[in-house]
Amino acid sequence: MIRTTALTKRYGKVTAVEDLDLHVAEGDRFGFLGPNGSGKTTTVRMLLGLVLPTSGRVGLFGSSICRDSLAQIGSLVEGPAFIGHLSGRANLRLSDAAGPRGSRSSRRRRIEDALEQVGLSGVDRRPVKAYSLGMRQRLGLASALLRRPRLLVLDEPTNGLDPQGIREVRDLLLKLNAEGTTLFLSSHLLSEVEALCSRIAVLDRGRMVLQDDLSAFRRPTGLIEVRTPDLYQAEQLLGKRVEGTAPDGLLLVRHDDPAQLNVQLVRNDIRVVTLRPRLRSLEAAVLAATGNGSDRLAGAKDPR
Ligand code: ATP
């Protein structure tokens, strides 16, 4: 859906994006991570044809950027702009994306569909200036959905939202993806990307340092967490394999095979409440790839 080749953007002496080879496939929930100033917005703008690359190329749906390919993309970049004293519905009516050449009834249907998708179909004539931030962001998404896009490109879609708003937007994006829309979203929040995305690229000072499936980042660490009320007996049995214990009955065991470990514990009359392999966190993977560069990324959920 998106394939960039050696994409580069310079502003005078500043290299905002350098040699970027992105690959986003149909159905992906693609997270584009990077600290502030790493070049995410510049990349998003190049993908949408809003900024011309200094060199390299952007491929969309198998061809270069053109009116047809852009018509299949819905986007939300740097916060939606709406006319405050008009209602959400009236704002959408002003958008070309509802199909400027379509009939009045088909435009109306598109608008109602988009409002329904984002959960705003019940809103009355309330002006947009009376909306909460979460409602505004959802209206922005509705505006991006008017074209019924195959691909949604979103720059920091949960910026400024409270936890409730973040959850609403996240649930909506997951639903749209399950219905077939490919997602490309930029964020500086590790936790957001970890909760939403299936595939991830990490940008650091304009260069891509990682691009892979989330599952590849989150590979096993060789440690298994065992929760047991028989902590002392388990420690005695496992000896040097125990890497650590916690007072609430959590044992950290170095072992490659969870099933085997479970059998060993149970055969020795040690009760197992839970047993699960500890996976490497996305933050650890990013840190390993970027050294101290990624400490400017915010909000890892489960740092280890
Ligand atoms: P943020 O998360 O803060 O939005 P970002 O990862 O989106 O950051 P960009 O906004 O793409 O990063 O900026 C990348 C670099 O390019 C920064 O050093 C920025 O100052 C520079 N830059 C971006 N746009 C311009 C411009 N129009 N003119 C000059 N420099 C620019």
Image: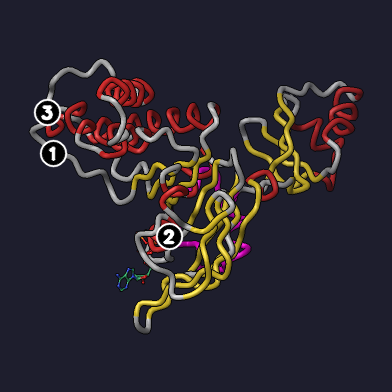
Badge number at residue 181: none
Mark 3 residue's CB less than 8 Å from ligand 1: no
Q: Which residue is mark 2?
A: 40
Q: Which residue is mark 1?
A: 83
Q: Residues within 10 Å of mark 3 (few under 14, many from 20)?
A: some
Q: Which residue is mark 3?
A: 127
Q: Earlier in the sequence, mark 2 or mark 3?
A: 2
* Mark 1 or mark 2, whichever is nearer to me: 1
Q: Helix, strand or loop at disc 3?
A: loop
Q: Is residue 215 magenta?
A: no
User: Which amino acid lies under the numbered mark 1 shown in the image of this protein?
Assistant: Ile
Relative side of 14 to 7, left or right: left
At 44% from the left and 37% from the top, the residue drawn is 149
Tell me where residue 209 sits by quadrant: bottom right
Relative side of 236 to 143, left or right: right
Farthest residue, direction top: 122
User: Which amino acid lies under the numbered mark 3 shown in the image of this protein?
Assistant: Pro
Q: Helix, strand or loop at disc 1?
A: loop
Magenta span covers which residues? Answer: 282-304
At 38% from the left and 48% from the top, the residue drawn is 156
Residue 41 position, x and y percent, is 38, 59
Tell me where residue 245 sits by quadrant: top right
Mark 2 residue's CB less than 8 Å from ligand 1: yes
Tell me where residue 40 sits by quadrant: bottom left
Q: Helix, strand or loop at disc 2?
A: helix
Farthest residue, direction bottom: 13
* Cα–Cα gap, marks 2 and 3: 32 Å
